[in-house]
Image (cartoon, helix red, strand yellow):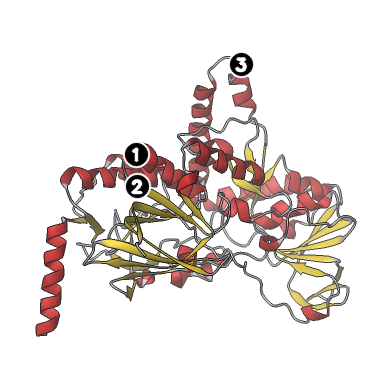
């Protein structure tokens, strides 16, 4: 049976995949394009997660695509709204007929001889094997395991008579009315779950080993609401997007440059919003932005604490018993339901393998080039967003860069583009070095590396990245370009050397 071949294949139909596909469909309408998606819907993360209150910590103006304004008076985006936004965008750009749903990618192999990627996948619903090929492959599969979240084993949890669930597997409409709920964790998911569950639950208790920084943000963009009375909506959106990007960047840089004063400011902010809470429950041990800040829209998390509907306990879990949790201090917390908001399992490329001429690529030994390509891997894009700003900002300029790279290849008549380190830039630092949430620390050895200097250094700086990806020359001395003839000749030379060695 003939293998379906495309100019470009994108892995994943979430925000990154759909956003990148939109850029390519618009800039290169003549190229054949397919999107492989394991799930049966678009949305990726936002289709998978359905727990109470699911939302983004990023504002809608900068979290949405630059080419498709997201008009709303609300600041933070709810999970259902994000799913609808991705679906609407895919329909608007005519992408639905290009998506192959239900396919789990197993391996992507680059053939130097044939100058193409061959992708092996399986239709999960039927077990049917599916093989497709392409000239250029773009990975937009994110960086965590969709099958399961990180869930440590708790001592004696088997004797607990209630339910222990992970937010990643919580179904939409999960009934917790009138129940005593314990949320384990202190990250963004826990900060979202606590106020969302507090109204219906009998009581919500957040058990944390250490506190996080939590920032109360207004969930209504009053500035834009006023400006909309006088200016076109498109102008107001651009102003809001620019304003929010600058604010986020300034906040991050201030935390990096003046960590102690910024820590003092955040602590004062949290103490003020929860005056009835023991300060030790709101005093993180790390500096701001060593981990991502948690957002509380309209201070909902703090309100749930002030109202008495929720509380915080800072301690370590000793063991479970039939009716709840016993802490190291000896305190017992009654529970009907325990939600283990204990983090994610990092998994690159959706759990598939990447190989060149049937030899697996060792990603932790490779550097990321401009945060978009992988060293020594031909015709392969890797969309990986920001951890200190909205994920999609990097996805947007990354998609624009890939369009520029494809245009350069067409213009110069080359068929293969590979990022090559010509300056001995390798280091031991991962692409997320300095970012220290538990799920990243656990997976640091799985990540690609970053280099000593640009374009191998990861900046997490939107302004610098935008210049590098959108304005700087594509052929910057770090890219190796080959025509079909030159690549074929090189392959012949390699084979001849192997025979005579």
Q: Going 16% across and 48% down the picture, which residue do you hit?
A: 413
x 55%, y 43%: residue: 86
Judged from the image, the secondary structure of the residue bearing numbered disc 1 is loop
- The residue under label 2 is 32
User: What numbered label is drawn on residue 396?
Assistant: none
Is 7 in front, or is 168? 7
Q: Position of residue 210 (x, y in %)?
A: 67, 64
Kind of element beneath mark 2: loop
- Left-right relation of 49 to 101: right
Side (left or right) of 216 relative to 395: right
Find disc 3 in the rendering and name its residue. Answer: 229
Q: Nearer the viewer, residue 327 or 266?
A: 327
Instruction: State yes or no: discs 1 and 2 in contact (Cβ < 8 Å).
Output: no
From mark 1 to mark 3, how far is it between C-alphas? 38 Å
Measure how far apart labels 2 and 3 are at the Cα level: 43 Å
- Given the current orientation, which residue lies at the most extreme front position? 1
């Amino acid at each position: 049976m003939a293998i379906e071949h495309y100019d470009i294949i994108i892995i994943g139909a979430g925000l990154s995949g759909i956003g990148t596909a939109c850029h390519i469909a618009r800039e290169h309408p003549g190229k054949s394009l397919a999107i492989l998606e394991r799930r049966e819907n678009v949305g990726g993360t936002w289709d998978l997660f359905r727990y109470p209150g699911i939302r983004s910590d990023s504002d809608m103006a900068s979290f949405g695509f630059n080419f498709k304004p997201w008009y709303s008076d609300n600041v933070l985006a709810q999970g259902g709204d994000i799913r609808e936004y991705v679906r609407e965008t895919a329909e608007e750009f005519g992408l639905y007929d290009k998506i192959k749903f239900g396919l789990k990618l197993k391996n992507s192999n680059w053939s130097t001889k044939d100058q193409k990627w061959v992708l092996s996948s399986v239709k999960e619903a039927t077990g049917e094997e599916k093989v497709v090929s392409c000239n250029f492959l773009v990975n937009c599969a994110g960086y965590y395991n969709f099958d399961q979240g990180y869930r440590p084993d708790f001592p004696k949890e088997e004797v607990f008579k209630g339910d222990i669930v992970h937010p990643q597997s919580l179904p939409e409409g999960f009934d917790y009315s009138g129940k005593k709920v314990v949320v384990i964790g202190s990250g963004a998911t826990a900060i979202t779950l606590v106020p969302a569950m507090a109204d219906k639950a009998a009581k919500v208790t957040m058990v944390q080993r250490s506190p996080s920084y939590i920032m109360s943000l207004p969930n209504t963009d009053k500035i834009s609401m006023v400006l909309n009375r006088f200016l076109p909506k498109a102008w107001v959106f651009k102003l809001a997007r620019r304003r929010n990007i600058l604010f986020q960047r300034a906040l991050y840089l201030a935390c990096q440059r003046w960590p102690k004063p910024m820590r003092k400011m955040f602590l004062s902010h949290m103490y003020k919003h929860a005056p009835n809470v023991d300060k030790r429950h709101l005093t993180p041990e790390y500096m701001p932005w060593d981990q991502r800040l948690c957002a509380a829209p309209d201070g909902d998390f703090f309100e749930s604490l002030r109202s008495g509907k929720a509380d915080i306990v800072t301690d370590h879990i000793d063991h479970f018993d039939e009716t709840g949790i016993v802490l190291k201090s000896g305190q017992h917390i009654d529970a009907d339901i325990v939600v283990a908001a204990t983090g994610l399992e990092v998994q690159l490329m959706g759990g598939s393998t990447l190989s060149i001429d049937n030899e697996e690529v060792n990603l932790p030994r490779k550097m990321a080039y401009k945060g978009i390509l992988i060293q020594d891997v031909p015709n392969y894009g890797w969309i990986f967003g920001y951890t200190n700003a909205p994920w999609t900002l990097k996805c947007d300029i990354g998609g624009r860069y890939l369009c520029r790279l494809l245009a350069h290849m067409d213009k110069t008549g080359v068929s293969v583009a590979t990022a090559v380190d010509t300056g001995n830039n390798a280091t031991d630092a991962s692409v997320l070095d300095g970012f220290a949430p538990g799920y990243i620390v656990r997976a640091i050895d799985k990540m690609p590396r970053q280099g000593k200097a640009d374009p191998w250094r990861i900046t997490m700086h939107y302004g610098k990245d935008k210049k590098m990806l959108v304005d700087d020359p594509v052929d910057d001395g770090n890219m190796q370009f080959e025509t079909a003839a030159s690549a074929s000749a090189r392959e012949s030379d390699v084979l001849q050397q192997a025979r005579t060695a």
